[in-house]
Structures are given as C-alpha cells and as structure tokens.
Image: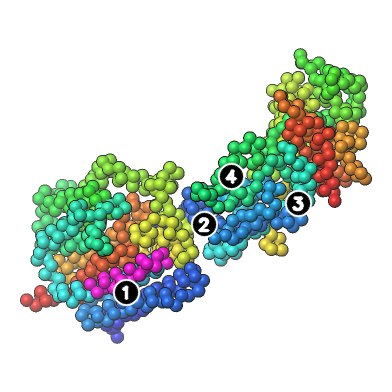
Amino acid sequence: MQLSRRTQELLLLAPASLIPFAGWISVDLARDGHIVPGNAVYPIVIVGMFAVAHLVLRFIKPESDPVLLPLTAALTYIGITVLFRLDMHMARLQVIWLGVGLAAMLVLILTLKDYTGLARYPYILASIALLLLFSTMFFGREVNGARLWLVFGPLRFQPSELAKILLAIFFAAYLSERRELIAGAGKSIAGFRLPRLRDLGPLLTMWALSLLLLIFQKDLGSSLLFFGIFLAIIYVATARASFVAVGLALFLLGATLTFYAFPHVEKRVDTWLDPLNPKTVSGDSYQISQSLFGFAEGGLSGTGFARGNPEIIPFVETDFIYAAVGEELGLLGAAFLILLYLMFSARGLYIALTCPDDFGKLLAVGLTAIVALQAFIIMAGVTRLVPLTGITMPFVSYGGSSLFCNFLLLGFLLIISSGGGEIAEKH
Amino acid sequence: MQRNIRVLGIFFIFLAVALLLNLTYIQVFGQKGLEENPANSRRLIREYSVERGSILTSDGQIAAQSRKTDGAYEYVRSYAQGGLLSHLLGYDSPQFGRSGLELQYNEYLLGRKPSRGWVDEMTKNVEKGYDLRITVDSGVQMAAAQALGARKGAVVAIDPRDGSLLACYSWPTFNPNLLVGQEVDAQGSLKADGQMRSYSQDSSSPLLNRATMGLFTPGSSFKILTASAGIESGFGPETVYDCPGIWPVGGSRVVNYGSPPKAFGSIDMDSALTLSVNTYFAQLAYNMGAGRLVDAAEAFGMNETIPLDYPGVEASSIPEADKMDSIELAWTGAGQGELLLTPLQMAIIGCAVANRGTIMLPHLMKDIRNGDEILERFETRPWKSPISSSTALSVLSMMVDVVENGTGSGAAIEGITVAGKTGTAEVQGKANHAWFVGIAPAENPQVVVAVLVENGGGGGAVAAPIAKQIMEAALK
C-alpha cells in the first residue's frame, strides 16, 4: 500500500517532534536541577506550529514534497532548543518569528498558484533585489563591522536575506530562456569550449556585484554566497565547466585584490591561518579560537545541554550557534546537523530532477544551493575549514529576517515539488 | 540538465564530507591540543568546577582543601595552616597557575589519575579529585618553624631509612590563601594581584623555597663529604697531618679559625672533624686530588637535580676537577671556595652517612587516596650509594664525637646519641651562614636534619640548637 505524501510527512514529523521535548527536559535538569513545567510551552507551541502547517498543507498542497517540512522542523527544533538554553528571551522571539515564517510560507503557497509566472518579470525582481541590497549602503546601520541592517523602529531587517531569493528567481528565469544559446556557442580549444565574450556579460555583472558587496558592505559571506548560487545555476543550465572555472578564477582574483586593499579582509585571513597565535588569541582571533575550544570541549558526545560554556563565544546565538551545538551535543550532534542539511539538499535537487520545466528546475537548484552553500559557509567558517564570514545558519541561527526568508524559500520549493506548472500546461 | 543536477549533488556530498572530516579532527584527534591551550578559559572553568582533592600531612592534618564559592569559579583553594607548609604545597590559583605539590600532583588532585573506568573517562564525570597524603609530619614541621623563628633560613628533615621528608621549611614564608582568593578591592582590581606583586618585589624573597632552591656556601659542614671521600680513597680515620694555623699552598694559604689562626699540631681525622680544622681537610683534599673529591661529590648527588617529587629543586654545584687549582681544591676540601649547596643536598649527604652508605630516593608523596581507600603508594627505593657501609659507620662515629666533645654540643639530646657537624660559612661582606647537619639516634638513625640560618653567625651556637629541637620532635 502506498502511503499518501502527507501521511509520509506526518510519520516523519512525529519522531522530529521528540527533539524539543527531550531538549526542554535536559536543559531544565542541567540548569535548574528539576523540570520546570512552565517551560513545556516551548516544545508544545513549536511542535503545534508545524502540526498546523502540516494540516494546512493537506488541504492546499497535498502532493508537495513530504520530506522537506520534517527536515526544516528538525533544524528549527534544534535551533530553538539551543536558544532556549542560551537565552530565554531570544528563544521566545524566535518562536514568534517561526510562527510568522510558517504563516508567510502558507500564504505564499495559497497565493502563488503558478510559479512559472515569476519568470515573466525577471528584471523587475532583479531590480528589487539590487535595491534591497544596496539600500543598506545608504540607509543601513552598521552592526558588528558590517552594514547589513535596515532599521524600522524596533524592527531590524536584513535585506540580503530576501535579495538572495529574488536573485535566484532572476538567474533561473534568465538562464532558462538563454541556456541553449549560451551552452552551444563559443570556440573550442583543446576540447575545452571557451564562453563567448557576450555570454560572459551576466557572469561579469555578478562578479562586479559580489565585489561591490564585499568592498562596501564588508560582507564577505553574502558576497561568496551570491556568487556561489549564481555559479550553481549557470553550471546546471549550461553544463559548461568553463563558466565555473572562469567564475572561480575571477572571484579568487577579486578576493585577493581586496585582501591587499582592505585591512579588515586581511585580518580575517590571518585569524583563519593562525587563530591560536598568542598575539591575537585574546584579540582579533578570540571568537574563532573560542569556537574551536568549544568544539574541542564537546568531543565525541558533547558536554550535554547547559553543561558547557558556549556563552563565552561572542555572537553564539547567531553566527556561532553551530559552536554551541558542537560543544554541548558533541561531534554526534554537529554531524547530525550536517546530515540534515545534506538530506535537505538531496531533496531539493530531487525536486529539480523531477520538475518538468526548465525554469522550475533551475529555481529549485538555486533555492537548494542557497541553503546548502549558506550552511556550508558558516559551518566551515566556525570550524576554521574556510575563513570565517558572518552569515546565519539556515533555520537554526537566531534571527527574524533569516528565519522568515528561509520559510519563504521552503514555500517555493514545496510549490515547485507539487508540479505548479500544471496550470501553465493546461493552456 | 539532469546530469548536471546530479554532479551538483555530488559536489554537495563532497562539501559535507569535508565538514565531517574537519569536525572529527577538531573534536577527536586535535581535541587534546586545543583543550590544553593556555588561552582556553574553559580549561580553567572546568578545572575549578571539580572539588579538588585535599592535601593531608602524614599525621592526617588537612593542609589544603577546596571550598565552594559563588564567585567566577566554583571552588577556591583554602590552606588551613597558612604559611607553615606554603613552599611545599605551593598554590592553586586561576590567575597565577600552580606551584609546588599543587602542580606536581595536579592530575591526581583533579581526579584524572589514576585513570577511572571508561564510562567516567568518556563523560568526564569527575565530582571530586583524589587526596594526596604527604610524608611531612605537622609536628616536625611546626617544630622546625618555631625553632627557626623569624630568621632567614631553611630546615630539611628526612627519614634516612626510606627517604621521606619529615619537614621542609623555609623562612620568610608567604600566605597562599592571599594568592588564590578572587576578592577585589575598592578600585575593582583583584586583591591577589597586588599581593603577588608585593611578594615578588620583597627583597627577602618570601616566595623562594630556600630549602630546595637556595644555594649557599656550606662551610665546615661539607667536611662530612671530604672525610667520606678521603676514606673511600684509601685514607683512614687514623691518617695524621700536621695542622698549623696557616697552611701555605699554591702561592696562597688556608687558615684555621681563631685570631691568630689556631694551630693543632699532628692530629687524626676524628679530632680534625670534632674540632673542625680547616688545614687538615685542605691537606686531605690536596692529597686525594680534585678528581676524587669531585667524583665523590657527584656520587652524593651534586651537579644534578635531586629527583624529589617537587617542581622547585636547584642542583648543588662543585666546579669541574680540571678547573680547580691547588688553592681552590684545598679550600673546597674545607667547605669554602666555589661550592654551592642547598639545605636539601646537605640533608642528603647526611642520609648517606646515616643509612650505611645508601641514599633512599627522597620524596614527599606518601600515598594517593580516595577517602580511606589507598589508590597508589610511593614506592620507596634506593637512589644512590656513594660510600660503603664501613665508611659511613666511620664518619658517623666521628660525627658523634663532634656533638659529644666538639663544636656541635648544642645539638646534644639527653638520653639519645646524636651525631652532627657544624658549619660556619664565610660570606663576603656579610655575616656568616650558620649550618648544622644532625643525625639521631646514632645507633639506629631515624632522622637527618639540615639547618641553615642565612647570615646567622656560628653553626655551633646558632644552627645546632635549632636542629636539636627538630630532632626531638621527630623522635617523639
């Protein structure tokens, strides 16, 4: 008997919902010595939110992918449990943002019947994305050395979170239209087909944009992420390894130039190469070295919730939340998160594989790449695999705009997965 | 496009594998190095969240103990006896680290050694460290402190039969409780910081353990070693030299004490030791040669660090044989010259004589305990055998004469045969150092005491009575 997709989803959500309950009990026991019944509101409310989302999906998108929602639930549960352990106030706000994010996702699914319609206005979307990105240059507020925030009274919004989704839609629309033109053209030298100069236009534009972000907003993370999403989509669209090679070479060139031109980038690289240098270990490389000490403290099985000292690490609730997981849940917990992201990526690419139209395929690839690359960049950064760049960990880090936009992203993937192109096909 | 999507998937798998390998390196293989990095404040938080084991004296007095606090660290160390054992115990401070036995036995006191079951190892589940019991007896240590009083100097008392240190005291001393506290003053700076500064800048060096690190000219007490070396080299207690007040050698001269320098005529080794005649031991050293004297000194442990289970031991030194001219050799035989000894080294020389020529490995740890259960016991074993049993007995009987008929009468104890040797070391421009090495009871030695009073005057008048009180306490 074949279970319906929504029943499969329910069966996957059930074990994931054990995470916040187990987390609540173990944090309370370690922190207070006894279970605080009032704190049960956290697991009950967040599990309830996902249950509601599941029920709504039964009615509005019964055929959408059954694995993505349980995977994001597991990631969100871990994130909120860690925040519950680190800072109750932040946990409370994150729960509210989770509700807002899930609601926005459902509204998106309800209203966007035909995702192919998005491909009709690529340049409008791109313009909005650019406006969002560069708005911070003029109206933004600098927080922690990078100018990434727009502030409206009590609300802070990080426009780059929304911009990356809009840009992914733009890339997918632009390339789904031109991919055959670009893929087939160009001179071949020694079996390696060079791209035509005019096809390099978009590539060069993206390169320039990424560098502008890097230079003016000191935002290496977003810069790397935008360029990575673009390369992933263009590679899938054209199968031209030469684009990837030229793109990476250009990015490295740009990054090297900025390394010599801007001291803050040079500092990042130095702290990456030698974080434990006694001269910088309590200064510039304090954060990364404390993160590494935290991971080492955790070892294989972790100290257990509320038995480590992740609060030593500055910004542990946002960019460095993975270090808190590594310290208190150990290699086992940290590896579990990697596997969750890998499963998310696999599912996203599976949606791309089974999607009937080119735009949907490329959009699924782009959205999946956002989550996969962003997770990789921050997890590799706090563990010193690559130089550290400040971006959030999707679904896990504290942050309203990040959580909100990630659920919009999930909404798009669910829409594509249930064959949103059907309306277009009927015409 | 389908193929390209799969290639991208493989790339994502590659990224995940890279993350996993790197994590495994940090959290498993590289873990130890990161944990031990001095900048790792988690190490301090973790170490001070364990109730550190206590340190007990051999008679069961608690000398160091962990006390729970509400400060930045869960536990803070408390030293019940203040400055009495401070040089030995050292301190255990988040700011200044560890010293003394707190450093030497840190892994035991933290409960990491001896190793526990693998479940506790994995979960690092240590609630309380193990206790360290030391060989020092609080009664003997107290007697040493009272006898020395407020005089710069040091005392070492050893049981020669097994190498246990019964007392090891140095004055001036410091109060370790003032270095481990986390209290801040009105300006918000740590009180312990100011205390550490004032101890470090104090010209009387209260942080220095003079017993194990202080290097002093030994004076006549070194004649025990010259006599032992002489007998081992074929000279005997019956060897007679003519001993004038002034003995010219190598274009210079060795003189006896007294003004004018006292002449003794023809005397044997026993009389020379009893009356501490410089010109006898100068001739003895000259006749046996520098090579034999230096070899003997090294056989007693000089020119190397005595392997006491304690992190602050200086090596005592004698110049190399080929660097000594005849006047240097002659004065060295009498205990002056370029010699530098610690009180610990002087006690070790006494131990060889007291224990029939064999020095037992000196040590401070008696055992490691978990409550009443003994987990590890110090294994007593011989360290060096510099002289034969008969040489040791000859020297011992001469030292009995020193106390009964000679310069060491101040150390005599009623009803017990005491052996000893005084030393009055000349110091350029300052008062003499007073030395005494005592052994009791001579028939069956149970304690060897070395006393040094820095710039204290004559060994017989100043150091011998101090040694007497300590030996009395040890034989009780």
* Of B139 and A199, the residue lying toward us: B139
Query: What is the spatial separation of the Cα atoms under label 4 and label 3, in whole angstroms?
Result: 26 Å
Residue denoted by label 3: B138
Same subunit: marks 2 and 4: yes
Q: Earlier in the sequence, mark 2 or mark 4?
A: 2
Q: Disc 2 residue type?
A: Ala
Residue located farthest toward the left when viewing the structure as drawn: A427
Q: Residues within 10 Å of mark 2 (few under 14, many from 20)?
A: few
Report the magenta residues as a range.
Answer: A85-104
Q: Looking at the picture, does residue A184 appear above or below residue B96?
A: below
Q: Does the magenta segment cover residue A93?
A: yes
Residue denoted by label 4: B195
Residue located farthest toward the top when viewing the structure as drawn: B251
Q: Earlier in the sequence, mark 4 or mark 3?
A: 3
Query: What is the spatial separation of the Cα atoms under label 3 and label 1, in whole angstroms?
Result: 68 Å
Q: Which chain is home to disc 2?
A: B
Residue denoted by label 2: B72
Q: Residues within 10 Å of mark 1 (few under 14, many from 20)?
A: many
Disc number at residue B379?
none
Q: Position of residue A356 (x, y in %)?
A: 16, 71
Contact, mark 2 vs mark 3 (Cβ under 8 Å): no
